[in-house]
Amino acid sequence: MDNVIHLALALLMPPLLLGVIARTKALFAGRCGAPLLQPYYDIIRLLRKGSIFSEATTPLFRLGPMVTLGAILAALFLVPFGQHRAPLSFSGDMILFTYLFGLARFFITATALDTASSFEGMGAAREVTFGCLAEPTLFFVLVTLARISGSLSLSDMLAAVSCRTWLQEGAPLLLLLGALFIVLLAENCRIPFDDPTTHLELTMIHEVMVLDHSGPGFAAALYAGALKLFAFGALVVHLAFPVSTGNTFFDWACFIMLMLLLAVAIGVVESVTARLKLARVPQLLVMAIILSAFSALLVMR
Amino acid sequence: MNSSGLLNASLVIGALSGLPLLFRALCIITASRVSMIMLCGAALAAFAGAAGILGGFSAPDVYILSLQIPFGPFEFGADRLSSWFIIPISVVCACSSLYGWRYRNAAEHPAAARRLGVFLGLLYSSMLMTVMARNTILLVLAYELMAVSAYFSMTTDDADDSVRDAGTLYLITAHIAVLAQFALFSLLAAGTGSFLMPAPGTLAPAGGAATVLLILALIGFGGKAGIMPLHVWLPSAHAAAPSHVSAIMSGVLLKLGVYGLVRTLSFFSQPPLWWGVLFLLIGAVSGVAGVVFALGQHDMKRLLAYHSIENIGIIMMGIGVYCIGAATVSMPLMVLGLAGALLHVLNHALFKGLLFLSAGAAIHAAGTREIDRMGGLARRMPATSFMFGLGAVAICGLPPLNGFVSELFIYLGLFRGLQSATGIIPPAMAIAAPLLALIGGLAVACFVKVYGVVFLGYPRSAEEHAAQEAPAAMRFAMVPLACACVVIGVAPALVSIPLQAALSAVIPGAAAAPGLADLAPLTWVSGAALLLAVCVGLPFLWYRRRLAAAPLGSAPTWGCGYLAPAPRMQYTASSFAATLTDLFAPLLRPRRVLPRISGLFPRRSSFREHVPETVLEDLYLPLLERIYRRVAPLRKLQSGLLQHYMLYIFITLLVLLAWGRL
């Protein structure tokens, strides 16, 4: 039963987060904003459309978005949602989890280069650069959690973090959470790293990589982005609020509420911060590495 | 015929496979075909023999060569560790030999074909001999033969200056390595009283002797494997060699350095803890620096060569985990670390062989090794492009291919280490794991760059429009390598049996301890591969059907409204890697010629950038230059006259004789 709810949430809820973020930003800007379900409408409309392919592309261009989507979908099977264990968990699954995102990155960037466009080349270059700077942070986070929990599976590692752990290991967990939130923003191309609503191709990261996708392929790319945000969000939420009510359904409700709260938080961050200069982005990512390294150091005492 | 018989036959047939090419009377085309078939047959026999030993169907035999020189007895024969290394040797050599048969038209380049054929056979047999030697001096002899035959195979195009320079550098460094091996084994023999290899876990090093042994092993075998400060010969040698020789050098020859290290380490029962930490450090440095240098390269083969250094770094990290496990008598760490290292040896041979062979086909078709002058090869060479793409995903360690499995073992070892022990071990492992992740991330950046720029997009130069798909034999040579990459990635349980056998040759008591299948989630890896196949396959099938039903259009790529896009405006590999190479500029020290722009109407200008072999050019060469100036007077001894050198040898022997009698 829990696995069915897990799967249903993983498949259906992610676009809602995008809607909530957009609504939060609209409210901050004094607009009433698009409907909360707008991302769903967008995806459904795109699915019904025909496609236009660039003359430069090879069959990889059609395969790429599907591999990206599939890899992220597979990763969602490994993340525990709230107090519920993931449908799949085994010793060492956290490495599979991070490497699945690597696979997704490989294909989305290779697909971008397939269009022979220099703009998409720039986007791909930024994506791989920032991606590989985010990777060590994620691993320091895993190192810290593995050390605290004594386990090597994502579900057990996160389940070991409770309110008690926060009291005992507060400092490393706080550092870790900060670093993880920075990685969440960077990996999902949110402000201050990238502005998903910008209209200038030169400055985009994620949006520019999918410029030449259309119809169902573009829908897959959008949907994959939402799924990725959801996967990272579930990690952050679990670490920040390890609350358990003891009742399965309350726990699920709690998880959904917290995810929506996270979306609001991202919306607030996006509204109150300005975008960083591109040259500054690696510096912030290196700072996240150092933060997470500190947290690993603290649990090594 | 039993396994040992197969291996011995393979050794002899391999060595003789160049023979038909030596007869001028024989038609070169027939001779090269016969030679190729002999080498492939020899390799298949060796594969069968090694598989027999690893599968436990046949007991390893030991033979004694009756050479009438000191240092005997010359025992040789393959044990389980040797057999594990024979697998990549045989697979890569067979595929490379088939590939090389079509790589260059033998009728047009008869001299090159003869030379390559003869030395390829010798190289194969000497590699086999190296791993089969049970006597350390025999090992050094085989190593020397291997170095020389590799030298002659890689300098086939010796009309080219850069090829000759690369060959000389290789020969010098190979001999420094042999010198260190000689010292290492002499020291060991002084302790044990014989040049025969000691049984695993029988020596206990301590104090200064341990330090000297480790340093000698690192220079002798680590230098050959290409660990970071000793790697200087590697990039130019791999770039200069014909592509299938590069595949053998990178895929197998380097691994024999790893073999030497593992074999040497296996003699010791409980090495000092700092050995393991040092190996982790060397691994991390080689891994990160290797991939960063690769990012800065513009030459496709040099780029692949730097990735070999990176992968040797990953293997060294595995060996580090093993050493730490051995020092603290922790069986899970020993098993996971060594299994990761040994499996990565095989994996790297497979995907690097595949990458060099497909890169060779691409370079042959495009007529250049410069990445930024290629482009759009996927349309003209779909098969080659697919093979390179598969190799690229595998080398990045991404699931569901084989690179992921060996990296997973090493990660599991690192994470277990940081949980269980205390002292220096947890911090060392806690830093090593994110560095391994950084290596993986950088490798993705580098391979997206080279795959995207070389195979995707539009051709960047005119010659490339005429590029054609490689001949069938060359394409077929890549198929076994590609299949093995997929099989090991999807069903790692299959290799865990031979791997466990190889481990038992190094770790005494490994057979009784919990095996690899208990320590690593092998079935889950297969399950994850299946899950991934479903998650990718279902949407893709739906998408295909959807595309067939909906209206399809075709248009130029979106260029922000610019109406005259040209292929030259595509993003280049240098720009792609620029942010990362800037970040690591203090390490890379790229040489840049910046454009000079002045005035309202600036004149034509140009930008040039080049990442040199920084360690060689900024460290070794200035150092050697200074040493050379100091000791220049000694050069008078080097008269260049043969009789003088014979006199030196005579005097030395006389002095040694007198010293011995006193």
Image (tube, coloured by chain):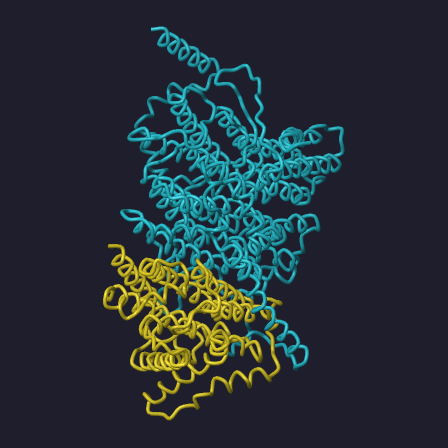
Near-viewer residue (B549 or B374): B549
Task: Give the total number of marks visible in the rendering.
Answer: 0
Name the quarter where the C terminus of chain B is drawn.
Answer: top left
Residue sitting at x 59%, y 75%: B556
Report the side of B384 relative to B600 (left or right): right
Frontmost residue, B23 versus B179: B179
Q: Position of residue A78 (x, y in %)?
A: 46, 67
Question: In percent of the image, x 37 and y 45: which residue is there?
Answer: B280
Which color was chain B given? cyan
- Residue B598 lies in quadrant: bottom left
Q: Position of residue A145 (x, y in %)?
A: 34, 62
Quadrant where the N terminus of chain B sits is top right
**The chain coloured yellow in the image:** A
Of all residues, the one furthest to the bottom in this rendering is: A32
Residue B225 place in picture, x, y as percent: 46, 39
Q: Position of residue B593 (x, y in %)?
A: 39, 55
Q: Nearer the viewer, residue A41 or B464?
A: A41
Height in image: B59 above or below B557? Answer: above
| As drawn, B311 above or below B59 | below
Is B325 located above or below residue A107 in the figure?
A: above
